[in-house]
Image (spheres, rainbow, N blue to C red):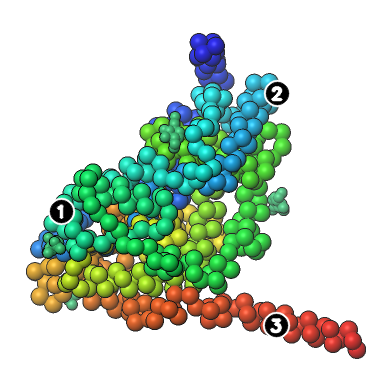
Amino acid sequence: MKFFMVVSALFITLFGHALAQFDYCFGKDTERSQTRQFTTKTAYQIIKGTNIDKQYLVPHCLPQKIWIFHRHGTRLPSRSIIEKASRLEELRDAIVKNYRVLRTAPSTNALCQEDLIALQMWKWNSSITPDMEEYLTSQGYEDLRGTARHYQKLYPNVLIKEYNNTYYLFRHTDSQRTTESFKAFTDSLFGMHNDAVAEKIPEEDKLLRPYDYCEPWAANNNDDENSEVNKYKRSVLWNDTLMEISTRLGFQYTLESKDVELMYDICRYEQAWQVDRTSVWCGAFTPPQVTVFEYAEDLKYYYKFGYGSDINAHLNCRIVQNMIEHLGSNALPNVQVSFAHSAGLQTLMSALGINKDDRPLTANNYQSMSERKWKTSNIDPFAGNFVAVKYECNNAPLEKEKVIFFLNQNAVDLDWCHVGLCNWSEVVQRYEHIINADCDSYYCPGVGALSAKPISIAVTLLMSAIIYLINLI
Ligand SMILES: *[C@@H]1O[C@H](CO)[C@@H](O)[C@H](O)[C@H]1NC(C)=O
Ligand SMILES: *[C@@H]1O[C@H](CO)[C@@H](O)[C@H](O)[C@H]1NC(C)=O
Ligand SMILES: *[C@@H]1O[C@H](CO)[C@@H](O)[C@H](O)[C@H]1NC(C)=O
Ligand SMILES: *[C@@H]1O[C@H](CO)[C@@H](O)[C@H](O)[C@H]1NC(C)=O
């Protein structure tokens, strides 16, 4: 049976070629540039900066202190996706049937034989069960071992190999994936049998998960029909993309958005789990289609965690104060590392004014925002990390204290710093509004302070009262 499949696969490959020479073929694409656009499911290895070796070394400056905010590494999907494994198998069978039985493959722009055969042989990894939702994968451990190894190599005098609990301070949220990320990171720093411990997780973790304790924030979700992402998902561009994808997969009708998004999700996950392999499902999408999907995700996150809503920049009041305090003090600990989530990393960027565009992302400006700074693939891949390094410089009599911020191993280019190197006094001044804030009230301002909602509710009430009165008359 297996032999037969291989032979028929070979035959089809040879035969199919002559017919479909110009079709996009993921399996044969050596660049696979679209895998850099998988937003929060992007693999760390393909997005991380590679210039940091040059950037971290500052002449006449010695690194003193480090502060890191680290998203967990590559993880399994949520339960709701794992439970759709059987739907993916149905889609696989339907696509194969379209090509092999119904012969409804498009005459141009079809799946290449290589991608089709890979899809035909695809199976859900049955050891991934719903009770393992969002667990760190083996690649996820590797992600964190990798960043620890890398930063320790660059800053051996700060990230020293000997652990003690006054020099190092670690924190993680209450989840398997962040706990295991902490372990992978510390195993890599100190060796396998170390006694590194993390801070006790508070009952209400307002430091690492402030968004869980802010109702106005939670109410401001993207599920609203009029959210930019939902408007985008009703646009001609989106509908045409779904139609193109469906046609390419041999369907005579347009697949439902949720089915296409499921294929897109599993493509991104599988690609991140095994970076060197090609995820079968990614073959269902051409690079331009991936770009359309990337924008939907960026829009969603822009309003949920980014500059799209003012409240997002407030949430991380405590962790920003924690960073400034840490870097500004000469006391131990010298190293603080926190392991948390996407929401934390993206809202931290919003608080610090990093990757901020001049114009907002909206449902209508996909084209003109193609060079946007808010690309979550670059900001928040799996194992995304923000590193602040404090330097003492002896050639600058006025400003001895400097800081460089790194995001995923690229120096952050803030316009008030000099090629990434910032004066400490300037850092303190720029973030004064947070440093001086009373976080208890600042981190989660009431709806009234930030949005027009209460006013519009009042107006609506007034209007209905008037209409009621008019009707009475
Ligand atoms: C299936 O998933 C399990 C759990 O994540 C993993 O350990 C295993 O390597 C996977 N198998 C394959 C063939 O990818
Ligand atoms: C921990 O290490 C630091 C730096 O080597 C040292 O100054 C400090 O005294 C150590 N603390 C303990 C409790 O060993
Ligand atoms: C796109 O498709 C959706 C769902 O089928 C539909 O509600 C919407 O009106 C379509 N948008 C346009 C611009 O045709
Ligand atoms: C840092 O401070 C020094 C001394 O005040 C000043 O000359 C320099 O321009 C500042 N650098 C930046 C990037 O602001």
Question: Residue beneath label 3, please?
Answer: 459
Mark sitting on residue 162: 1
Q: Rate crowding at label 3 as few (under 14), some (14 to 19) or many (20 or more) other CA atoms within 10 Å.
A: few
Residue toward you, 364 or 44: 44
Q: Is residue 394 above or below residue 264?
A: below
Give the quarter of the image for residue 461: bottom right
Residue 88, horizontal then vertical, whole percent: 60, 35
Mark 1–mark 3 Cα distance, whole angstroms, equals 63 Å
Residue at x-position 44% and y-position 28%: 28
Picture quarter with the N terminus: top right
Can I make out residue 340 in this image?
yes
| Callout 1: CB less than 8 Å from ligand 2 | yes
Q: Secondary structure at mark 2?
A: helix
Residue at x-position 51% and y-position 71%: 214
The amino acid type, in three-letter code, at marker 3 is Val
Mark 2–mark 1 Cα distance, whole angstroms, equals 65 Å
Residue at x-position 34% and y-position 70%: 320
Residue toward you, 452 or 123: 123
Mark nearer the viewer, 1 or 3: 1
Residue 260, horizontal then vertical, whole percent: 61, 42
- First reached walking from the N terminus: tag 2 or tag 1: 2
Mark sitting on residue 102: 2
